Image: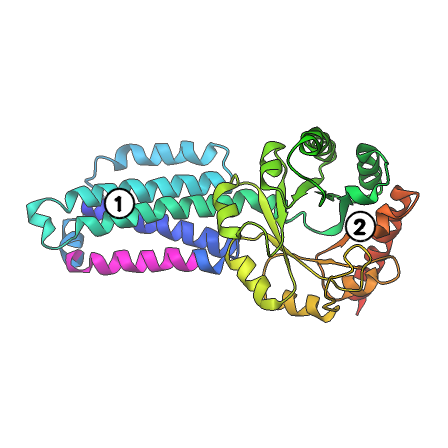
Amino acid sequence: MLDANLNRCREGLRVLEDVARFLLNDGELSKRFKIMRHDLAQKTKPLGVVLLSRRDSEGDVGARFSASYSREARLAPRDASDLVAANAKRVEESLRVIEELARLPEISSMLNSTSFEQMRFTVYTLERDLISRISRRDKTEKIVGLYVILDRELLAGRDELDIVAQIIDGGARIVQLRDKSRFYGEKERKLLPVAQKIRDLCHRAGAIFIINDYFDLAVAVDADGLHVGQQDLPLPIIRRELPIDRIVGCSVRTVSQAKKAESEGADYVSVGSIFPTATKKEARVVGVNRIRELKASVSIPVVAIGGINRNNIAEVVSAGADAVAVISAVLGEKDVKEAVGKLIEKMDLAKQQCRSL
């Protein structure tokens, strides 16, 4: 029983480690599974020869039905989340069996049951972290291209839904709702249905919908994600409380802030202000080179923001920004759809020129 469950445990941990390593390119998660696998080998080293001498794969009654079960399992539809869940359960169940066996008098002198219990609870947490990353991957991969921020203060009375429809028709597939004047009361109650309608419009078009700053609103309207600044709720708290399939973006100015955001669970970072901007006159300009520095330092998407328009967007794309966030360059134009389309044309041309170099 010990031999069989240790084998199941090691095999399951290796699958989870490789998912983190090759599918998600997550060095931290991969390292944690690897350490656990090595720790398991170290804890059971005293039993190595004894276990091998008792192994009888040919005589195992379980081998009679495991082959047919495996064939059925291979035919079942599975995705990466299913793969993680199945192998995590395999590890957790095996650890529980080992934990119980380690309490027997003839084994307790060689194995510490408490250490396997602790390992099992660690796997519970790692399973959640891994499935969380996988479930957010599709949304994170869409953080590319033009990222339009719908700042309600700049709408000048125009209908939000009409503007969002023009943004989407123009080709943008990321929309963020921002309302810095929000306060608890009548204005908040009016913002909720607006956000819900924008979410529905974005989802029908296959666009990502993100709420700026307000955790409660993002959860209430089932937004795809939340974007926060350095002075908002800490990322570890957001990551803990937000549904595991929602993405989180974080505004940064420096490389150290970007690295910290990534380590704390941010799915992308927004860096700026790249150029002087009328939207935030107090914003510190960090310049185009900061984009290159962040791209060399973090593995998550980098969104450039601040003073970007039709005249300088190519420079930002050439610096390596995964997405470009704009406000005035779209909302400041009479024809929003046309403004979006022209910005995207500039971005596409810049990408072609970069590839040809």
Query: Dot 1 lies on which element?
Result: helix
Residue picked out by circle 1: 95
Residue 1 lies, with reference to residue 197, above or below; the image says below
Q: Horizontal and vertical percent for residue 167?
A: 82, 41
Which residue occupies 85% across, 42% down? 170
Residue 293's mark?
A: none
Residue picked out by circle 2: 327
How far apart are the alpha carbons under marks 2 and 1?
53 Å
Q: Horizontal and vertical percent for residue 212?
A: 66, 45
109 to the left or right of 84? left
Q: Horizontal and vertical percent for residue 43?
A: 21, 58
Residue 317 lies, with reference to residue 98, above or below; the image says below
Return the residue nearer the eye: 83 or 349: 349
**Location of the N terminus (image quadrant):** top left
Residue 56 is at least partly visible in this image: no
Residue 291's image quarter?
Answer: bottom right
Snapshot colouring: rainbow
The region drawn magenta spans 30-47
Of marks 2 and 1, the one in the foreground: 2
Question: Which residue extends farthest left?
Answer: 105
Residue 106 lies in the magenta stretch: no
